Amino acid sequence: MRFGLTILPEHTWRAAEPMWREAERLGFDHAWTFDHVTWGGLPDSPWFAALPTLAAAAAVTERIGLGTFVSSPNNHHPVQLMREVLALHDISGGRFLLGLGTGGDLDAGIMGEDLPLRDRVARFHEFTRLLDRLLSDDHVTEDGRFYAARDVRTLPGPVRGTGAGNKVSLVVAANGPKSVSLAVERGDGWLTYGGAADTDEEWWALVGRLSRRVDDALQETGRDGAGFARYLDLDSAPTFSLTSAAVFEDAVGRAAELGFTDVITHWPRPTEPFQGAREVLEQVAADVIPRLR
């Protein structure tokens, strides 16, 4: 099992910098930040952009993976995002994890879009395939339903595809059958938050069904699942995973039983969401993670 920690981009860099350093010191394998214009969980909070934050985090860390949780078509164009990915891949020394998802309703509304869900999912699929191509090829031309690219030079790529050495990892967030199939088709890994549930048991039942959906997609495509990472956001469950070390250990055990290779928790905050104690984070890092890794 590998372990991730999400640091919300709500802090000035002076306050955030020691948190990113600490995530690495505590032994986490990867660290993430939300990529939204505004996040519904903290709509009135200060909020900073994800990609510059990760570039700054890359400059003050050496080992830890750094990821977007998650980038979406709501606030990115594939051609523009390709350039930012190339920069982050270079600055981080190959540690960047590109998390992609359909995107939420709030950001879509803020950006003045009113696409129905079916069209937003279709746009996400086109977005992901074009971005993957831009990171894999040069002189890219495409005329799609949502995006166009005209002889786009992608140097210094490729950072994905055949021949790419230390490549950018693509992690696709998906719950629906079509997007899960996209994750298996294009991604190096799959990410899920499970879904909305009133109780922990209901949430774990959702997660189990989604994991089996990935099993089915791997079987249908004939892809070897051994090298396919599965990331679970533990903190979409009703109970925050860092409520106590025992709660965290139980959640990791259940995730492992369902075939997940990676779990992600959140830096504890003094108030909701993700309200918790720094002492629990330190206990988990010192006692639980080394035993379960």
Image (cartoon, rainbow, N blue to C red):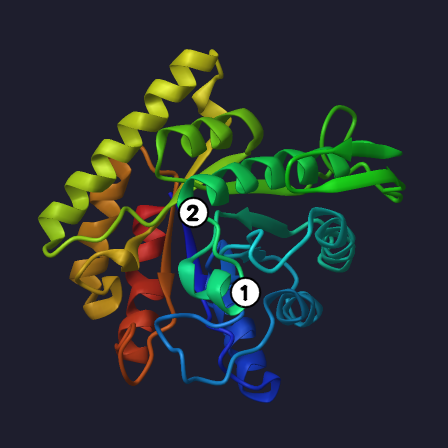
> Which numbered dot is residue 112?
1
Residue 165 visible in the picture: no
Secondary structure of the residue carrying tag 1 is loop
Residue 247 quadrant: bottom left
Q: Which residue is nearer to you in this view: 229 or 208?
A: 208
Secondary structure of the residue carrying tag 2 is loop
8 vs 108: above or below: below
Residue 154 placed where, x, y %?
A: 85, 42
128 vs 236: above or below: above
Relative side of 119 to 82, left or right: left
Q: Which amino acid does label 2 sit on?
A: Pro
Residue 237 placed where, x, y %?
A: 22, 56
Give the number of marks: 2
Residue 266 placed where, x, y %?
A: 37, 66
Q: What residue type is labelled 1?
A: Gly
> Which numbered dot is residue 241?
none
The residue depicted at 76 percent of the width and 38 percent of the height is: 134
The residue depicted at 17 percent of the width and 44 percent of the height is: 204
| The N terminus lies in quadrant | top left
Residue 127 placed where, x, y %?
A: 62, 41
The residue depicted at 27 percent of the width and 57 percent of the height is: 236
Q: Which residue is nearer to you in this view: 144 or 277?
A: 144
Q: Which residue is nearer to you in this view: 13 or 247?
A: 13
Q: Name the residue under label 2.
A: 116
Relative side of 4 to 13, left or right: left
Residue 244 visible in the picture: yes
Q: Which residue is nearer to you in this view: 51 or 141?
A: 141
